[in-house]
């Protein structure tokens, strides 16, 4: 009976705190430059390594945690994210592991399940609980500041997930820790939760284990990427996105995800994302990446599995798989639900701009422009 009371009290905590969640606004404010350089750092010394995070190499081969382990790349761990309104974390949940009820006060979270299965849920400000069972390839959206959790109900298999956030700040507020480990008086907690001090002491003494009840959360779930890691290698490059067009629950949430698949020697040609910074996480293989800032400086880097690279908002960038034998796969997170993509070759040579204008712009002749257009034309 006591354990049931404890479970009910913990569920009451989640419901109560959901009613105090902040109103969602845009994520981090826009910056006035391409990127933010740390103090006492000369921009002339920067190269591609500044925009690269290698702290997750080998993460999918690491030992199973005892419960849950979250490895994040926020602006603290990855300073190049400062001002870019996007960050990532890799979650590893042991069999039976739980990421206890918590909030992300600065950002919406978009969870992409890479391996295993998860029970997930959140509570909105009307105290409604949304839950869903996720399979590998599924996504689930956790609106900004709302109490949420993830639970691996499988008793035999570890679950891996990649979480993207529409903020460079990696702040997470654990509900159990905040209430029961930060010194709030037992009498105050007992009154707030309408129970007695003995129950509060019991919760503090034994970690609470919340029963999860499925109430339906399909609206917040995207299943269009199931099986994507087992799909055939594309002939060159394929990008599969989950933006607000494909996943309406993202509308207004300031975050989205895409899976990028490269054949051997495949390329994602130079392009821009006009509405968002992009944060690329290499899952498999290697990639050559780069971007050009507004001073026309090129930043390049060679990435391995587990590496991240940030592409500042609006700048021309590319990804290329230089390996002529092995494919490559990456997950890209964007600090917008609709980041947009503008292909430079398509925009210039396939939209009807007069060839004379292009020839003058590129200081060449019309014959060269026609040759480029012919090369870009679809092959019959």
Image: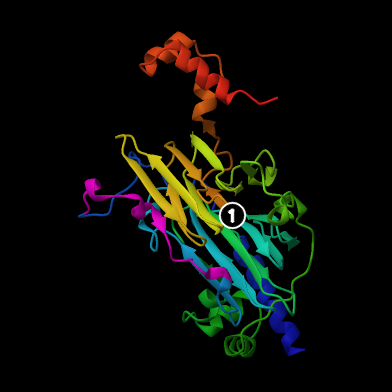
Q: Position of residue 361 (x, y in %)?
A: 38, 16
The correct choice, above or below, for 124 with respect to 297 in the image is: below
Corner quadrant of residue 186:
bottom right
Q: Where is residue 370 in the image (x, y as percent from the top left)?
A: 51, 15
Residue 273 in view here: no
The correct choice, above or below, for 126 with respect to 35 in the image is: below
Corner quadrant of residue 126:
bottom right
In terms of depth relative to the viewer, which is nearer, 9 or 188? 9
Instruction: Tell me, yes or no, whether the highlighted magenta stretch contains residue 58.
Output: yes
Quadrant of the drawing holding the C terminus: top right
Does 355 sit left or right of 229 as displayed? Answer: left
Q: What stretch is highlighted in magenta?
A: 41-60
The correct choice, above or below, for 312 with respect to 154 in the image is: above
Residue at 62 percent of width and 58 percent of height: 111
Q: Where is residue 136 in the image (x, y as percent from the top left)?
A: 71, 61
Q: Position of residue 311 (x, y in %)?
A: 44, 45
């Amino acid at each position: 009976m006591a354990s049931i009371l404890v479970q009910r009290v913990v569920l009451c905590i989640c419901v109560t705190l959901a009613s105090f969640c902040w109103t969602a606004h845009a994520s981090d404010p826009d910056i006035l430059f391409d990127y933010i350089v740390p103090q006492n750092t000369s921009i002339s010394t920067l190269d591609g390594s500044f925009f690269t995070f290698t702290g997750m190499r080998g993460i999918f081969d690491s030992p199973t945690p005892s419960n849950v382990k979250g490895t994040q790349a926020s602006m603290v761990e990855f300073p190049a994210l400062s001002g870019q309104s996007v960050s990532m974390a890799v979650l590893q949940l042991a069999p039976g592991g739980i990421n206890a009820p918590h909030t992300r006060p600065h950002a919406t979270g978009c969870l992409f399940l890479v391996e295993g299965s998860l029970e997930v849920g959140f509570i909105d400000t009307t105290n409604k609980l949304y839950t869903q069972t996720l399979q590998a390839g599924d996504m689930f959206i956790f609106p900004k500041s709302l109490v949420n959790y993830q639970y691996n109900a499988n008793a035999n298999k570890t679950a891996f997930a990649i979480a993207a956030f529409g903020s460079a700040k990696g702040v997470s507020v654990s509900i159990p820790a905040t209430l029961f480990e930060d010194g709030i008086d037992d009498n105050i907690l007992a009154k707030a939760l309408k129970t007695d001090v003995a129950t509060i002491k019991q919760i503090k003494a034994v970690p609470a284990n919340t029963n999860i009840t499925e109430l339906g959360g399909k609206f917040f779930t995207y299943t269009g990427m199931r099986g994507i890691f087992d799909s055939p290698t594309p002939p060159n490059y394929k990008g599969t996105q989950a933006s607000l067009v494909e996943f309406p629950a993202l509308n207004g949430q300031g975050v989205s995800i895409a899976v990028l698949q490269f054949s051997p020697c495949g390329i994602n040609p130079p392009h821009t994302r006009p509405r968002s910074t992009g944060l690329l996480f290499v899952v498999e293989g290697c990639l050559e990446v780069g971007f050009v800032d507004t001073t026309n400086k090129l930043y390049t880097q060679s990435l391995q599995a587990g590496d991240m690279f940030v592409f500042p908002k609006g700048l021309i960038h590319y990804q290329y798989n230089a390996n002529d034998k092995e494919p490559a796969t990456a997950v890209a997170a964007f600090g917008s639900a609709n980041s947009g993509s503008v292909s430079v070759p398509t925009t210039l040579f396939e939209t009807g701009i007069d060839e004379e204008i292009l020839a003058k712009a590129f200081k060449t002749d019309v014959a060269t422009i026609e040759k480029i257009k012919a090369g870009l034309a679809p092959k019959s």
